[in-house]
């Protein structure tokens, strides 16, 4: 893509703090892709900062075109439509199709997961 819609960017851990996330039990570190791509992509590291609620995150879906996750540390268990309950450990990754229903039902205290999505801003729908 050489159309000028992306710019070079670097995100250094020492310069980018984790902030409260979309869910109260996660903190997020924005890696700067929204700004660098004019909102076409988003990359964040999500880190556990509290226990998973009883029953999990609740079934929901995301209205987006692309979602990829990679577990950096710890583990997480997710109920995924058509797949059942799946446990992902450090080093595991998964491509989550658009608008697939899922529920995060558990995770370790040391969980960190990298998430890449497109577009960078998207709607989450509780189901």
Image (tube, rainbow, N blue to C red):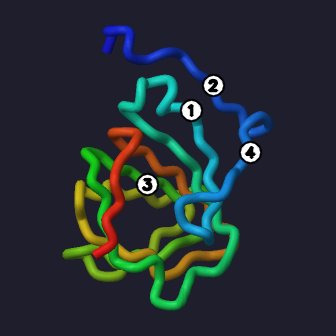
Residue indicated by mark 2 = 10
Which mark is on residue 76?
A: none
Mark 1: which secondary structure?
A: loop
Work out how far the residue at label 2 is from the one at label 3, CA to CA, in angstroms. Answer: 20 Å
N-term mark: 4 or 2: 2
Tell whether 117 sits left or right of 110.
left
Check the image and report above or below for 11 versus 88.
above
Which residue: 47% across, 32% down?
34
Residue indicated by mark 4 = 17
Work out how far the residue at label 1 is from the one at label 2, CA to CA, in angstroms. Answer: 8 Å
N-term mark: 4 or 1: 4
Front-most of residues 87 and 5:
5
N-term mark: 2 or 3: 2
N-term mark: 1 or 2: 2
Q: Are marks 4 and 1 in contact (CB under 8 Å)?
A: no
Q: Are marks 1 and 2 in contact (CB under 8 Å)?
A: yes
Residue indicated by mark 1 = 32
Tell whether 43 sits left or right of 58.
right
Mark 2: which secondary structure?
A: loop
Check the image and report above or below for 38 versus 109.
above
Specify the farthest residue to the bottom.
54
The image position of residue 49, as x and y in percent, is 69, 69
| Quadrant assignment for the N terminus | top left
Q: Are marks 1 and 3 in contact (CB under 8 Å)?
A: no
Mark 4: which secondary structure?
A: loop
Q: Can the viewer see residue 73 in this picture? A: no
Residue indicated by mark 3 = 69
Q: Are marks 3 and 4 in contact (CB under 8 Å)?
A: no
Task: Count neighbours of disc 4 (C-alpha within 10 A) and say few if under 14, some if 14 to 19, many if 20 or more.
Answer: few
The image position of residue 108, as x and y in percent, is 63, 76
């Amino acid at each position: 893509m050489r159309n000028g819609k992306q710019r070079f960017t670097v995100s250094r851990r020492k310069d980018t703090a984790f902030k409260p996330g979309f869910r109260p039990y996660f903190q997020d570190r924005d890696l700067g892709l929204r700004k660098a791509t004019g909102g076409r992509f988003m990359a964040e590291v999500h880190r556990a900062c509290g226990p998973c609620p009883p029953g999990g995150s609740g079934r929901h879906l995301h209205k987006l075109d692309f979602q990829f996750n990679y577990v950096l540390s710890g583990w997480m268990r997710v109920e995924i439509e058509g797949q059942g309950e799946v446990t992902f450990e450090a080093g595991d990754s998964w491509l989550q199709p658009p608008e697939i229903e899922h529920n995060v039902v558990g995770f370790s205290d040391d969980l960190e997961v990298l998430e890449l999505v497109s577009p960078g801003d998207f709607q989450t729908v509780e189901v």
